[in-house]
Image (spheres, rainbow, N blue to C red):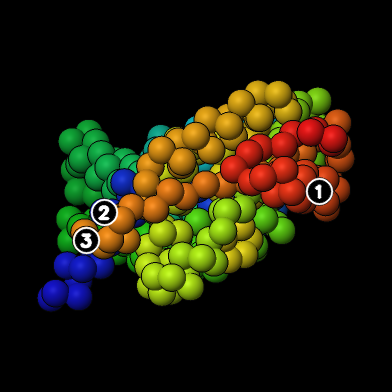
Amino acid sequence: MSTLRETLDDLAAALREPPDDLLLEIGAGGELLVARLRVLASVLLLLLPGLNLLGGGSWPDTLAGLVGAAGVLLFSLAWLKLVLGKRRPGWLPMASSCFDVTLVTAVLALLGVLSTPVATLNSTVVWSCYLLAIFATALRQDLRVTLAAGALAVLQSALLWLAVAQLAVGPLVSAEYGTATSATQLQRLVLLVVVTLVTAVIVFRARRLTQWSSTDGLTGLHNRSYLNVQVPAKVEQARRDGQTLSLALVDLDHFRHINAELGHLAGDRALRHAVAVLRRELGREEPMIRVGGEEFVLVLPLPIGAAWERMEALRRRLEEAHFVPEPDVEPRRLTLSAGLASCPQDANDLSGLMKRADLRLRAAKAGGRNRVVARDGE
């Protein structure tokens, strides 16, 4: 019981966490995959009406299936075009998932109009598409999307049941679809809830594994995996959009003296202190990455001049926030040196930006440390 409670608590905590850049990028890739799968599935769905007719199905059922499949195909092609666009709206995954669920509901309702009300409740093939729509949300790496799609499927399925029960005249019995019973409908609602929870747990575990693989254990910052995978994409996006992006290579000054004088445990606390001070000043669009011992990379969506002002403010903020190793130990002043490089002025790729930023970091150290260098010769 405690394990279940802990799992639910973890899911609730994950819901409150905004997805970071890496998860958003993975989710965007998942949205593209879903869009392509939706096109493939809609093409296959076009075969079902013909198979239904060949198997002795009625013309109304065949017509409903054909209209539904054609509508799904047209929507799928339009949605794929939207996903392939340069800019993907933030609402896209939620809208896409909710539309998938609503489309299943619409086809079920259409079956009831063109065939028999029992088809709305007992069409196993169409109803199973609810499960596919919920499972597909796992590719989007967003718990909120999964839970929203699952809740919408339960709500719409329940409303269909109530509507048919209220509007039907006589018993809900059909030679082709059997008898629609309350027990069956309740079982289906429970199954939708179970599938939603299972999918949510899968998404949660995938998110955690992704975060662990790209996060530094000591500081909680992104690690080199993020630098090598995500930052090149940011540089390319800025270059393609004609925007300026600056990269700062940061090193804490004389940090080894703290390890030597106070011990490595105090050094770890000092490192976390410096990271906490800097992160409080940074926005979500300014990722901070630990690339080695006391060396970090900051990605700033700013031109070189504004980036220098930003880093200079961060340098002063760290200098003012003294580190206290122990209550009875004298506070230590922590400082940083930084070298800046910008795209496209200095380089158009991550390697070139890192090389130029490293040269300027060396200049900052040679110039006395505790300073930010943004141009050669400073």
Quadrant into which the C terminus falls: top right
Q: Secondary structure at mark 3?
A: loop
Could you say where residue 313 lies in the image, as x and y percent from the top left? 53, 30
Q: Which residue is mark 1?
A: 359
Q: Locate residue 192: give its quadrant.
A: bottom left
Task: Give me the disc on residue 12.
Answer: 2
| Residue at mark 1 to residue at mark 2: CA–CA distance | 46 Å
Q: Which residue is mark 3?
A: 328
218 or 257: which is nearer to us?
257
Instruction: Sort mark 1 into few (<14), some (14-19) or many (20+) by Cα contacts within 10 Å.
Output: some
Callout 3 touching callout 1 (CB < 8 Å): no
Q: Locate residue 175: give its quadrant.
A: bottom left
Q: Residue at x 46, y 65 (%)?
A: 258
33 relative to 222 in the view: left or right: right
Q: Nearer the viewer, mark 3 or mark 1?
A: 3
**Up-down relation of residue 141 to residue 264 (above or below):** above
Quadrant into which the N terminus falls: bottom left
Could you say where residue 295 lies in the image, as x and y percent from the top left? 61, 57
Sequence-first disc among 1 and 2 = 2
Q: Residue at x 81, y 48 (%)?
A: 359
Q: Residue at x 86, y 40 (%)?
A: 348
87 relative to 119 in the view: left or right: right
284 or 325: which is nearer to us?
325
Q: Secondary structure at mark 1?
A: helix
Res. 359 visible in picture? yes
Identify residue type, mark 2: Ala
Identify residue type, mark 3: Asp
169 or 356: which is nearer to us?
356
Sequence-first disc among 3 and 2 = 2
